[in-house]
Image: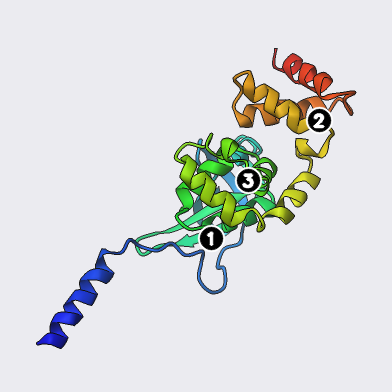
Amino acid sequence: MAGASAGRELFAAAAAEPPVHRVNPGAQLISRLRGTLIHRDLDRVEIATPGGVVYEVEIPLTILERLPTPPADDVEIRTLQVVREDSVTLYGFVEEHERELFRRLLGASGVGPKVALAMLSAFSAHRLAQALAEKDVSALTQVSGVGRKTAERLALELADKVQDLAVAAGRTGGPAGAAGAQEAVAALVALGFTFTDADQAVRRALEDGQPESPEDLIRRALAGRS
């Protein structure tokens, strides 16, 4: 009887534990999708493959802005498959470093896909990796659902694990690759811009050539918004 009672207690404890998300245990089944973009929403897209299968893929807002208006043929996105006890979900990204950053966020304690997606919606991959690497708690708390304690824990866990991604993302054309660009982004945020809008404004300003100073870059970014 004692053994049976102990068994019931162990079963009850196991049943009470929340489902653990896993990043596609074993080999990743779907790592890329290529086909026709038939629907695009704020947080998800639908892609029809040549075989006639339509996949729904959840995406961060920063990815949405770089996808064409549907219908659009020959669209390819990188995906990460997350398996839970009650669901299988695909998350989509344009660049490899974006997918890898999402993967590493999921590896941090207490971070699920919802929070990781929110972080990559609020920041470009470069800005997020840089904020984590520099333990910029104030920046991280700008993300909806991320309080100070969570931000501090993430910075502590991931600071040394995202250094390579901060560099890789910067090489793909992020604004931090130019002198004074991060100061310009910070200044725009102080003026009321969201991180995403500030990042994009600085990117556009940099298309006109190397600025003479951070102040010059800020003026260009503001002029581009008018």
**CA gap, disc 3 and disc 1:** 17 Å
Q: Residue at x 77, y 50 (%)?
A: 167
Q: Name the residue carrying label 1.
A: 107
* Identity of the residue furthest to the top in this view: 226
- Give the quadrant of the N terminus: bottom left
**From the viewer's perspective, is residue 76 above or below residue 6?**
above
Marker count (numbered) = 3
The earlier-in-sequence mark between 2 and 1 is: 1
Q: Which mark is residue 135?
A: 3
Query: Where's residue 10, x and y in %?
Result: 23, 76
Element carrying mark 2: loop
**From the viewer's perspective, is residue 29 above or below residue 37?**
below
Element carrying mark 1: loop
Residue 49 in view in this figure:
no
Label 2 sits on what residue type? Answer: Gly
- Asked if marks 2 and 3 touch (Cβ < 8 Å), the reply is no
Label 1 sits on what residue type? Answer: Gly
* Identity of the residue furthest to the left in this view: 1
Label 3 sits on what residue type? Answer: Lys
Q: Name the residue carrying label 2.
A: 180
- Nearer to us: label 3 or label 1: 3
**CA gap, disc 2 and disc 1:** 32 Å
The earlier-in-sequence mark between 3 and 1 is: 1
Element carrying mark 3: loop
Query: Seen in the image, is 88 located left or right of residue 161?
Result: left
